[in-house]
Image: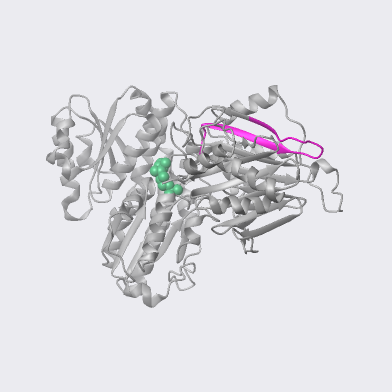
């Protein structure tokens, strides 16, 4: 949650006194640009703090509400020029989203400022200690405790890095902290424990950010920090140490997408753009995964082949949309590999004493790579002896670093809070994993795998077709903007698609939406059906096995007979279903297991268009944040 930016540059010093190339950027502008790109992580309030030569106090501004409120405040009351800056966009935990609770938090002498992402669990105890020592608190936040503690330590050491290390050792919970001090206006110090922080490397300038989006407009060179590390940046240096003050290593990497990928590119919203990115997201995730003989080569999977051959159970752990992607993958992996697959919400997995051992492969799915619930589940699984393979979109994030292997999706940055292209690319990556296991374990012949890969490669063009048919979905959504409840039904792989359709509508349009397994209807949910109740139904292909198609058609008839308005997603040429649909959204023909990649697209467009028709912000729905870094 919360987005964090730090910057230090020689711009103000006109050329760099020591001959190093000078950055010409203004720290405040860099910080605001970073916050603009990180606002998806939280948008309850925003703030900045600046340090500059000759200034004996930190200059700061903070405002509740979206970043635009802070920008307005800065236009009315400009801050002085600076050499170092930190900035924060908040998703409130302790203390409501007010100006006072917004970050930065300053020490009593006004010389030190701190921003924070995470939750300090022992804040009450530390606060009591500080109050006893005469410290006065202004906010209700846990962060201010860290600020006051850091100020106390700084008073003793006069060294911000050392003070940060002592402070970090005293804190429990999760945190990324950044601090600036008026006495050292070229330095920003950060600390991380179970919360993300990456370093951007520049010339005559350096950056810190919750993720690379914070500095992608300025540099693609980055450092991935490890757990429990302190980083001190100046315009010309980056020093990393552990919480004991010992020098530590950080891994360098180059960001493989550019700033334009994180722009709206003419679309009304990031979500709309990301829906349109989906054909590329699938194609790019498939790219470069085979050798010259057409055999799958997932080079990133550094888990011994013998270990993978011996796997007797797979557990997929994930949350939200990523969990639904895992749910879809379960059908394919079980079918192709004949290995039992369980799908479990990460936050439930950890607390139910799961049966996990060295023959269990745990697959952690996460767009951000930072979801705390999933990270904790990864740690728990590894402690129990399981191998963990993560399917992640964001490089430099924590979950891949703590996994035995990672399969990256190549969806590019996903900025809208509602996940779209990540879902399609996660299914694609999980399917690649399933086929790879089938190849390794000999469950499928090479030509069967090649045929399935070719079917996957046909998908991007079909997804494009569904997107191009989107206007009818949008018009239907606009006509339903006053709906108060929408239900979603599906069977087999259509069931997680129904769940995902309902989640999209809930989070974007704030209306009651529920997804059901169509077969479950008669066991209770059918009582919800009343005259005019809109129900989306994901219809399997008429070619699907086990007569699935006719069973779902019967379900449509059952709800229609009770007054439901049926909104049907069906395969081109499915004449049978046409008779029972009030509205029909056609998708191209595809093998049953691949249909989710097509069937979900009208549901994404529907939720986005309905929310837009209601005048809601589709990129930043209320109460949510993109990256859920608290448990
Ligand atoms: O970054 P992750 O994929 O781990 O995030 C998991 C969920 O928080 C995420 O999918 C969430 O459900 C989305 N907002 C749904 O659109």
Classify residue 136 by image quadrant.
Answer: top right
Taking the image in four quarters, ligand 1 sits in the one at top left
> With 461 as the anchor, is 255 left or right in this view?
right
Residue 215 visible here? no
Tally of marks: 0
Q: Is residue 9 magenta?
A: no
Q: Is residue 59 magenta?
A: yes
Q: Decide which of 304, 351 is in the foreground and name it.
A: 351
Residue 344 visible here? yes
Q: Position of residue 610 (x, y in %)?
A: 38, 28
> With 232 as the anchor, is 118 left or right in this view?
left
Classify residue 606 by image quadrant.
Answer: top left
> With 365 as the anchor, is 114 left or right in this view?
right
Residue at the location (40% across, 62% down)?
A: 432
Whether residue 562 is situated above or below residue 39 in the rendered picture: above
> With 520 as the anchor, is 288 left or right in this view?
right
Task: Name the image colouring.
Answer: one colour
Residue at the location (26% across, 67% down)?
A: 338
Query: What is the residue that sits farthest to the bottom in this orientation?
Result: 306
Q: Position of residue 243 (x, y in %)?
A: 59, 58
Q: Position of residue 368 (x, y in %)?
A: 48, 49
Classify residue 391 by image quadrant.
Answer: bottom left
Q: Position of residue 387 (x, y in %)?
A: 39, 67
Q: Decide which of 175, 566 is in the foreground and name it.
A: 175
* Magenta stretch bounds: 42-61
Residue at the location (64% across, 64% down)?
A: 246
């Amino acid at each position: 949650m919360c987005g964090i930016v730090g910057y230090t540059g020689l711009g103000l010093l006109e050329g760099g006194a020591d001959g190093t190339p000078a950055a010409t950027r203004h720290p405040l502008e860099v910080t605001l640009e970073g916050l603009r790109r990180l606002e998806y992580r939280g948008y309850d309030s925003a703030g900045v703090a600046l340090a500059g030569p000759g200034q004996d106090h930190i200059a700061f501004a903070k405002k509740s509400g979206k970043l635009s409120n802070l920008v307005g405040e800065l236009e009315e009351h400009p801050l002085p020029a600076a050499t170092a800056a930190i900035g924060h966009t908040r998703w409130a935990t302790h203390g409501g989203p007010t100006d006072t609770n917004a970050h930065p938090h300053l020490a009593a002498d006004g010389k030190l400022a701190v921003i924070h992402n995470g939750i300090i669990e022992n804040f009450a105890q530390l606060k009591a200690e500080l109050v006893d020592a005469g410290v006065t608190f202004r906010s209700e936040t846990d962060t201010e405790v860290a600020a006051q503690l850091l100020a106390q330590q700084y008073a003793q050491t006069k060294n911000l890095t050392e003070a940060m290390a002592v402070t970090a050792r005293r804190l429990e919970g999760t945190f990324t902290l950044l601090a600036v001090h008026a006495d050292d206006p070229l330095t920003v110090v950060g600390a991380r424990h179970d919360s993300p922080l990456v370093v951007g490397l520049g010339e005559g300038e350096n950056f810190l950010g919750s993720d690379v989006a914070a500095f992608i407009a300025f540099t693609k060179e980055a450092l991935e920090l490890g757990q429990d590390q302190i980083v001190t940046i100046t315009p010309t240096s980056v020093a990393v140490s552990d919480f004991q003050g010992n020098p530590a290593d950080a891994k360098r990497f180059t960001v493989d997408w550019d700033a334009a990928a994180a722009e709206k590119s003419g679309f009304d919203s990031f979500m709309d753009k990301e829906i349109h990115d989906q054909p590329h997201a699938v194609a790019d995730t498939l790219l470069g995964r085979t050798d010259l003989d057409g055999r799958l080569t997932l080079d990133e999977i550094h888990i011994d082949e013998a270990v993978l051959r011996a796997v007797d159970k797979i557990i997929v752990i994930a949350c939200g949309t990523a969990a639904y992607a895992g749910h879809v993958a379960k059908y394919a992996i079980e079918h192709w590999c004949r290995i039992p697959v369980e799908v479990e919400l990460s936050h439930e997995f950890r607390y139910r004493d799961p049966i996990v051992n060295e023959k269990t492969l745990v697959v952690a799915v996460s767009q951000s790579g930072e979801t705390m619930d999933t990270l904790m589940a990864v740690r728990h699984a590894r402690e129990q002896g399981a191998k963990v393979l993560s399917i992640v979109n964001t490089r430099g994030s924590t979950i891949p670093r703590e996994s035995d292997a990672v399969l990256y999706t190549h969806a590019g940055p996903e900025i809208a809070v509602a996940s779209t292209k990540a879902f399609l690319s996660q299914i694609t990556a999980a399917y690649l994993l399933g086929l790879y296991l089938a190849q390794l374990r000999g469950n499928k012949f090479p030509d069967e795998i090649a045929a399935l890969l070719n079917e996957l490669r046909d998908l991007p063009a079909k997804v494009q077709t569904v997107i191009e048919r989107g206007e009818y979905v949008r018009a239907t959504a606009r006509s339903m903007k006053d709906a108060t409840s929408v239900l979603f039904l599906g069977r087999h792989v259509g069931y997680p698609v129904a769940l995902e359709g309902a989640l999209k509508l809930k989070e974007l349009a704030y209306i009651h939406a529920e997804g059901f397994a169509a077969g479950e209807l008669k066991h209770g949910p059918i009582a919800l059906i009343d005259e005019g109740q809109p129900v989306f139904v994901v219809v399997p292909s008429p070619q699907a096995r086990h007569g699935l198609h006719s069973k779902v058609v019967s379900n449509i008839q059952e709800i229609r007979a009770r007054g439901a308005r049926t909104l049907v997603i069906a395969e081109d040429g499915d004449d049978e279903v046409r008779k029972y649909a009030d509205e029909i959204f056609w998708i191209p023909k595809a093998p049953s297991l691949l249909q989710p990649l097509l069937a979900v697209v009208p549901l994404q467009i529907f939720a986005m268009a309905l929310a837009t028709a209601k005048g809601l912000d589709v990129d930043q729905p209320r109460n949510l944040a993109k990256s859920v870094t608290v448990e």
